[in-house]
Amino acid sequence: MTAHTHSHTGEGFREVADRVWVARYAWFDVNVTLVGGALGLLVVDTHGSGAAAREVLHDVRRLGAGEVVGVVNTHWHFDHTFGNATFREAYGEVPVHAHENARDELERWGERLKQRVRDHEGEDPHRDEVLATEIVLPDQTFSSARVVDLGDRAVELVHPGRGHTSGDLVLRVPDADVLLAGDLVEESAPPSMNDDAWPMDWPLTLDVVLGLTTPATVVVPGHGLPVDRDFVETQRGELGIVAETIRDLAGRGIPVEEAVQAADWPWERERLETAVRRGYEQLPRSQKRLPLV
């Protein structure tokens, strides 16, 4: 595997707050974050394959800030979890933390995702490395909140609700006023809503996330540059418009297949096909006017 296949967007890890480093990788434009403490480093998200994670590992070692003592997966998607095995190979049986739903979803859908990659022969330059990846499930799960002790620093893991998936978590580093938001916040593109997203819940989930911030908080999204609380408030507003528009369309009896074209949206329509379908599915019957047969 040649090094240039995984070109960096930046150059390895950059410190965004006291002993919090972020590296941004070109494949998926994904962020990997390190939180340092007296006991060692916590790696937050592990990239999209064993091979991709080996590049992350190289950057961790080049930084020279200590040994990895734990891993956190912000949600189950493969660009955030498929490097877990690589970190276990390098540092032994380090704990892998995640929300309980994220663990279950990775178990349910991880191999299915590899099968989808297998079926699309020859399209993806990363195909072989994804197929060669061993999926390692998180072994430290929780339902609402957990604290990880790094010695001189406590890191809070919080499940603020459903949004990008049903198992999103955010990490708060209180002494540095940093919040790692996973894909509940995205800077490089509008938030992505796949078949496992919860568009009707997402705005309320971001309200909980905003409650964990101050005006000075550095917020690290799953993809793109670090942002501030104002950015998160703006994105929460846009997600709120999406949810309210879906509720309005369904309430007026607009069929789901016409809904995307029937309204104005904060983002391009093609980004919203799945979100609208998911939103319609998630609305209680009482909020939909069913077309008369």
Image: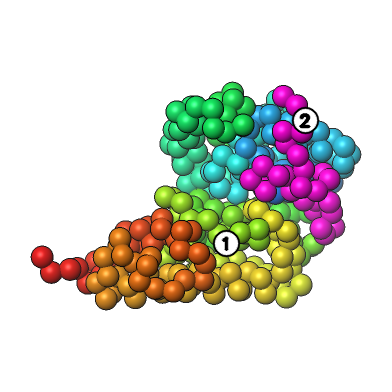
* Vertical relation: 170 (above or below) 248: above
x then y, percent, for residue 167:
50, 51
Q: Which residue is mark 2?
A: 3
Label 2: how many Cα within 10 Å (few below 14, some 14–19, many 20+): few
Quadrant position of residue 42:
top right
Q: Residue at x 57, y 33 (%)?
A: 124
What residue is drawn where x is 72% and y is 36%?
A: 6
* Residue 3 as seen in the image, left or right of residue 140: right
Q: Which residue is mark 1?
A: 190
In this picture, residue 251 sits left or right of residue 78: left
Q: Secondary structure at mark 1?
A: loop
Outermost residue to the left? 293
Which image quarter is the C terminus in?
bottom left
Q: Give the residue type that dot 2 points to.
A: Ala
The quadrant of the image that shows the N terminus is top right
Closer to the camera in the image, 57 or 37: 57
From the viewer's perspective, tell me whether residue 221 is left or right of residue 274: right
Circle 1 Cα neighbour tier, 10 Å, few/some/many (<14 / 14–19 / ≥20): some
- The residue located at (73%, 75%) in the rendering is 215
Do tag 2 and tag 1 residues touch (Cβ < 8 Å)?
Answer: no
What segment carries the magenta color? Answer: 1-30
Q: Indicate yes or no whether the magenta region holds residue 226.
A: no
Residue 174 at what x, y percent from top left?
A: 74, 62
